Image: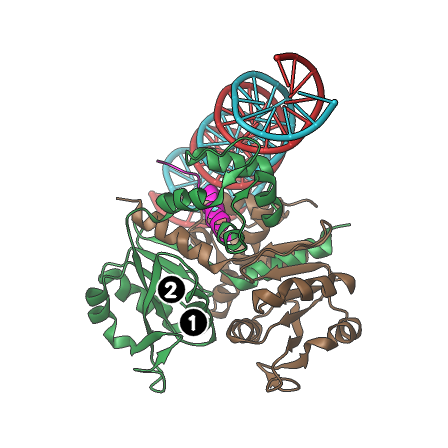
Chain colours: A brown, B green, C red, D cyan
Amino acid sequence: MILPQKSIERLSRYRRILLNNLEKGKEHIYSHELASQLHFTPVQVRRDIMLIGYTGTQRKGYVIKELIDRIGEILDGESHTNAIIIGMGNLGKAITSYFNGKRTNIEIAAAFDTDEQKINRVISNVRCYHISKIKEKMDELDISVAIMTLAPEAAQEVADQLVLNGIKGILNFTSIPLNIPEHIYVEDYDMVTSMEKVAYFVNHNE
Amino acid sequence: MILPQKSIERLSRYRRILLNNLEKGKEHIYSHELASQLHFTPVQVRRDIMLIGYTGTQRKGYVIKELIDRIGEILDGESHTNAIIIGMGNLGKAITSYFNGKRTNIEIAAAFDTDEQKINRVISNVRCYHISKIKEKMDELDISVAIMTLAPEAAQEVADQLVLNGIKGILNFTSIPLNIPEHIYVEDYDMVTSMEKVAYFVNHNE
DNA sequence: TAAACATTGTTAAAAATATAACAGTGTTGT
DNA sequence: ACAACACTGTTATATTTTTAACAATGTTTA
């Protein structure tokens, strides 16, 4: 099934909200409830849910439990994804601890750094190795995704290694864009850009 | 001037790359160079630059210095934006240190936390106050944007306070969506969603 | 100097995404 | 039982965003 990128993103958001509501003991949810909690529109919600072939019950909305499962089938598929995080500074730590406890089928299986202080320590439940161990660990742990949270100076060099060892996807928090072959999926996130965007729209609305 | 949201984001990225190239002593840059460094297309670059009314020199590309200035006029306008960061955990620290040294017209002017250990300390060049001081500091420092990097449990409560004190924009890294009046610009970023997206496309391409 | 070239700038077309409109349908209330 | 209702599901339309096509033009080269 081919789903729009944007729908994929929203599905992930839906799931989080749904889990949240489930915890609170809620069993059903209307499209407009989901929408308002996420600042989407109800139509958009219904459309996305249509696209994944789930159908709710009339007048009662969607069965939260079922919808979570259906989203899981789409987003997670069969596969459990093993990731590594490269650079265990503040951002690296933030992300790993962020993932702990979140019920996803993605696991951060190892971390890498160059700081001797961190090597072989377990930080946020993830063991940290020296960056020279990347190849070894990637093979051992069947890693497909890397999260780059290291200093920009070293980023390209590490990226090259990852590519060499068969990485399939990269989530890049480094401020510089990486030079990576086409067939590898790269998602860049740049905090400064987010910030500048907020500032722009704040200063341009009246 | 009304610019597409997407163009705004890209302009921010261009500027970063341009600064980068300027540092290296480069004076001119072609649309295709900019594009390849960012994984955009040359046409897109040219179109964005057209939209902001800058025009390059034929056969030599764009004058980096001039283009940076023009982007600055668009993105920054007159205004210097003062921001606060709420929650000085790993993510809060990562973001503040990320901003230091980046030449933007956005300044993180204060941080807030509840941890007594952090109160009144200067972390990444930003002084940290107890969260009860928000109102006081917002007035004093003329704050328009808040970055939320605190635990989700407390997020809504703090958000309400920010709204009450006239915040204009929020960059929300909390995993829960905030209930905020329409007229305030909110940008949500969710790391788990980014991660799930990468995993999805990694597991679905062949 | 003139032809070939490489690049920008711009308009037009295509693709992706979001919104609207409304039909279908179980549920509730009378 | 039947009418009014409040939802979902889906098709159609509109908007936004990207991509393509190509005209315009200064630069280089022969």
Label 1 neighbourhood size at 10 Å, few (<14), some (14-19), many (20+)? many
Residue B186 % position (x, y):
38, 54
Q: What element carries label 2?
A: strand
Q: Chain letter for mark 2, please.
A: B
In the image, residue B185 lies in the stretch drawn in magenta: no
In the picture of the structure, the residue carrying the numbered disc 1 is: B92
Three-letter amino acid code at the position of disc 1: Gly
Q: Which residue is drawn at 73% across and 65% down?
A: A161
Quadrant assignment, res A154 = bottom right
CB atoms of marks 1 and 2 within 8 Å: yes
Which residues lie in the magenta part? B1-16
In the image, residue B8 lies in the stretch drawn in magenta: yes
In the picture of the structure, the residue carrying the numbered disc 2 is: B147
Residue A170 % position (x, y):
65, 60
Q: Quadrant of the N terminus of chain B?
A: top left
Label 2 neighbourhood size at 10 Å, few (<14), some (14-19), many (20+)? many
* Residue B198 appears in the picture as rendered: yes
Query: Which residue is more in the foreground, A104 or B61?
Result: B61
